[in-house]
Image (spheres, grey):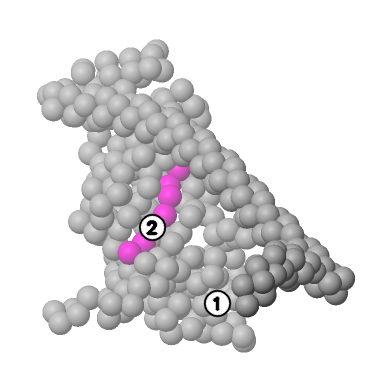
Amino acid sequence: MKKFLIFLFMCLPMMAAAQTTLTPEQKLEQAQRQLEEAKAALEQAKANAAKAKAEAEARAKKEAEDKAKAKDIEKKIADMKAEAERLSREAAALSEAANKAETATAAPVTKAAATTTKTVSNTSSDAWVVPATPSTAAARANKNVSADSKANKDLYLQKGIIPEVNGQVVWTETFNVPGATADELYDKAFAYLTELTQGDNQLSGSKVALVNKGEHSIVATMREKLIFSSSFLSLDYTQFNYVLQATCRDGQATLTMNRLVYHYDVQGNVSDLSAEQWITDKYAVNKKQTRLLPVSGKFRRATVDRKNSIFEGFAQALK
């Protein structure tokens, strides 16, 4: 028994060695597993590299976009500053003109003083002078008295009553004033347009916006109520925006009215309507050209009446 046990102990290492020895099939399977594990590790490495590359590209793109955005913001800020400076200069010029006009109006005006003012106007193109003549023409124009629609129904149907220049509604008229200098006409036009912007129906933003004394040119932006009908119980009107430009020369003054836009509020529903798409023949007159359409027609009548009152008042102010 003892000998058997000794023999058994001697065989144990040999049995263990026999158990650790792999068959060719097992070696092949082991190699395949190792290959698959290596492939999986490679794929994972590729995925990690692609992810890192994508994240790096995304960061680079975001940084580039942030830089571009910052540059764009800086440009906008610079543009806004430049615009603010321009508007500030214009406001200062207009304020100076208004102060000079107020000073000239506040001083007592005698016949001799009026003559002196006229002489200075002719000799100095830089002087701001407001004429002493009463500006009753603007006051009359601001009454906005409409013509009798029944008596003048054919007037609003006339061909060319709404003139179009390059697709835009534009009224332009030149008034001859023999013997008057450009300075004199400029002063009268300035006084007329200034008073026109101060009428009872004028709204915020109605003002003489730009002036050029050297070129004898004035631009007024008008914001007003254009009234269609008024009674104790109701008021039918539209906000009427347009631009007036007066340009003066020796013996002549030209007045232009354009950029006409209506803001019409009907029970809280506001419509923005341009003159080109609302009061022209195509939109305000029936196909037979025999009558005005109900809604756009009233805009056409009121606009023509308002234009006539402004231009007639301008002609009177130049006298």
Quadrant where the image shows the N terminus? bottom right
Q: Secondary structure at mark 1?
A: helix
Give percent across and percent down for residue 307: 42, 58
Left or right of 180, for residue 39? right
| Mark earlier in primary sequence (2, 1) | 2
Q: Which of these two is toward me, 52 or 178?
A: 52
Outermost right residue:
24
**Amino acid found under the numbered disc labelled 2:** Asn
Q: Which of these two is toward me, 178 or 85?
A: 85
Q: Is residue 299 visible?
A: yes
Left or right of 43, for residue 109? left
In the image, which residues are magenta? 239-247
**Amino acid found under the numbered disc labelled 1:** Tyr
Q: Secondary structure at mark 2?
A: strand
Circle on res. 283: 1
Give percent across and percent down for residue 69: 51, 42
Say which residue appears at 45% left-offset and 77% top-offset.
296
- Give how far apart the Cα atoms at labels 2 and 1 are: 19 Å
Circle on res. 43: none
> Would you say residue 63 sits in the magenta stretch?
no
